[in-house]
Amino acid sequence: MVDEKITTVGPVRVHTISTNKYKTNTLVWKMKAPLAKETVTLRALLPYVLQSGTADYPSVKALRTYLDELYGATLNVDLTKKGEDHIMTIRIDVANERFLPEQTPLLEKALQLLADLLFRPALEGGRFVEDIVAREKQALSQRIQAVYDDKMRYANMRLVQEMCKGEPYALSPNGELEDIDAITAERLYRYYEQSLAEDELDLYVIGDVDEEAVLAAVKRRFSLPDRPQPSRAPLASAKARGEINEVIERQDVKQGKLNIGYRTNVTYEDDDYYALQLFNGIFGGFSHSKLFINVREKASLAYYAASRLESHKGLLLVMSGIEPANYEKARRIIDEQMQAMKNGDFTDEEMEQTKAVIRNQLLETLDTPRGLVEVLYHNVVSTRKRPLNEWLAGTDGVTREDVVRVAEKVALDTVYFLTGMEGATENGKAGV
Amino acid sequence: MEKRVYETLQETLFYEKMDNGLDVYILPKKGFHKTYATFTTNYGSVDNQFVPLGKTEMKRVPDGIAHFLEHKLFEKEDGDVFQQFSKQGASANAFTTFTRTAYLFSSTDNVEKNLETLMDFVQTPYFSDKTVEKEKGIIGQEIRMYDDNPDWRVYFGAIESMYHHHPVKIDIAGTIESIAEITKELLYECYETFYHPSNMLLFVVGPVDEQQIMQQIRDNQAKKSFPQAPEVKRFTYEEPSGVAEKKKVIPMHVQTNKCFVGIKAPSVPNIGEQKLRHELAFHVLLDYLFGKSSPHYERLYREGLIDDTFMYDYTEEREFGFALVGGDTRDAERLAAEVQKVLQSFSADAVQKDEIERVKKKKMGAFLRALNSPEYIANQFTRYAFYGASLFDILPALSSLTLDDIAAVADSCFRDSQIAVCEVVPKGQ
């Protein structure tokens, strides 16, 4: 299905996936370390500083001009969390010169550029350029504040903060606003050296590529110290809660955001992982799921009502946008759907339908270089290795009993509702 | 079946016009798991006044009805088409733009079945009073969701400022008040007028056998009968060339200011090939001025007036075209002033030829990257086809683009009369 070859070059795991279905070649570099308050903001800033200049192209303008010359190679960075790991990603995507009038060896140049971004950053006086760091600190604080203005993202973030209070997972991958000020160019440079020495490193190369040539290039350009095998901290334990945490927040909004968090008590590591996927698919993952059918189609309460999994941490997160006055009604309907799952109140047809859709979703994801890397990277984040063909067979093999067993483990943790200033008494104009 | 080979791109496209007028295109893509198909009508939110099929008088319909119809087409007497698709392992969706309504599925299995479902559900409307009323609650929440979204508000606010009368200024979903007027009779009337096969295009891209798929589509269409339909008569809005309102400020409960500068094209070409060229010239010009490698970008970024949300884009459809430049900012007034200064101080004489060549190179790479995506191919091919151009002409058109093409765009659009500003600012400021 996908031909992934993994070779270790020093501390770097090089994953090559050779395919000729794309018109571009893609490099994805990932650095992983535990999610922690002390480092989260440094990590949130670092890749943005790295993408602002190299020794040869020491400014954004110089670097971007070079990327344009490489037929509009794209360079972007982002931060994510998987379970309680914090991952920095740098991606470069470059046209395959086979489709262009001019035969420049673009992939080789892209690999060289990636190495330069990582090992030959723009420096002054042995540390990052003051001006770049100052600018990126400002951009980071704007990035953090922007979440506040996007109510869907804001409600998601607030739910996780409330639900995982005291656990590393409560941290946002974009860091903490109040920690930005204290970061200096020197401190960030020290952290850069530390992360290159200690992080888990993975490089994915996808496209019309020759594995031997890629490995030779990586050996030549990526020279890094060996490091001990990372030890995995156990997940912060879900606090045993007798009661459900309910948080209501008021802002000047027209639509209420009802977000509900559950602990699944099943993760990627567990045998029941595929059953958990199926559970989520029947409950709220798709447009045939119980949440969509009952909250949206039958009760006409919402435009979106869905659930998703954080499968390394073991969370199930429900989100919906409703008229503030419909809070109780929406909660009741969502509760009923969860109870139905626990009672095994779903048909064999729903089982089969969901299996078909999950299978389709996986195969579609593998069609994009970015999606492919994200699927494969699960096996880096987890100690449990699941080869791609096992995903299909694993999903197929799930029985109704498996799904009910998972449903019984799913426990309501926190209800978060972002609602208007007027309170829940406003009479909705949109309701039927 | 006609075969079109694009040598440089190593792509082969198959085309046939069905007897009922439907245009069908198939692009086989080996190596992909997924097949993606779109069934699109040349009908969008701006088509709010027209002569209904079989009638003689112009009729004005409620705002948001094209989008409402898109939602309602998924519901049938015996249930919801989403269910049918997911039983067949497909994921289905639809979207409405200013000028198009597209229905689509993607699947890695059961492609023939899913294609049959797609053609049949789009060509078998079922609207009832009850389901129309129910949908008003759902779309009402969709409208509310956008009302609370400052990015959408600043984007649409800028378009509103640019246009006097043209319905591009009206939100695609309409308003809670306008959708309240929608009835099943109105939906049928819009449907019959715009969903005639001769006003539609079907695109299939994926690991498919073109002979087999084309035969399936022929058989499917031959089973259905449609009345004779003349070309749809749409109302032509008399739109002044300049902007309607220089500046609009929307106070919202936000922490970050947002600002867009809108640039209204006084007119756009109406011949496909020229439209494509005009559009590309606009894109290259904006990239030259505001791309990350431009001096302006660096300066504005350094001053904290822009951040990663900064964007610039140009939209050209049938008879209108506009660009938007902006994003989050710490000072909306200053960003608006700076962007306008860049536009008005532009002089084609000062442009280095190699700088334009670099931007063209960048655009070529971006086009190749976009061709990795079946979604992009189907959606954009359809868009260009509806206005008489071809997606696959982009590379040669880019190559032959000259400084004169670019200068002509700047000359007609970078004028005070063509520029409007919209800002979203924190409430109480």
Image (cartoon, coloured by chain):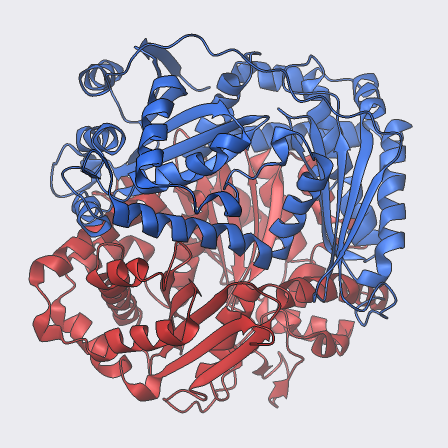
Residue A189 appears in view: yes
Report the front residue among B132 and A315.
A315
Give me the residue at 39% from left, 18% from top.
A198
Q: Which picture quadrant has residue B91?
A: top right
x then y, percent, for residue A303: 72, 56
Give the left or right position of residue A121, taking residue B387 as reference. left
A393 lies above or below B259: above
Q: Which picture quadrant has residue B311?
A: bottom left
Instruction: State the quadrant of the C terminus of chain B.
Output: bottom right
x then y, percent, for residue A364: 52, 33
**Residue extending furthest front?**
A182
Report the front residue among B408 and B22.
B408
Give the left or right position of residue B352, taking residue B269 as reference. left
The chain letter corresponding to blue is A
Report the front residue among B190 and B359.
B359
The shade of chain B is red
Give me the residue at 38% from left, 57% from top.
B307
Residue B1 appears in view: no
x then y, percent, for residue B401: 16, 63
Give me the residue at 58% from left, 75% from top.
B251
Give the left or right position of residue A430, taking residue A40 as reference. right
Give me the residue at 13% from left, 56% from top.
B357
A262 lies above or below A384: below
B254 lies above or below B223: below
x then y, percent, for residue B419: 36, 82
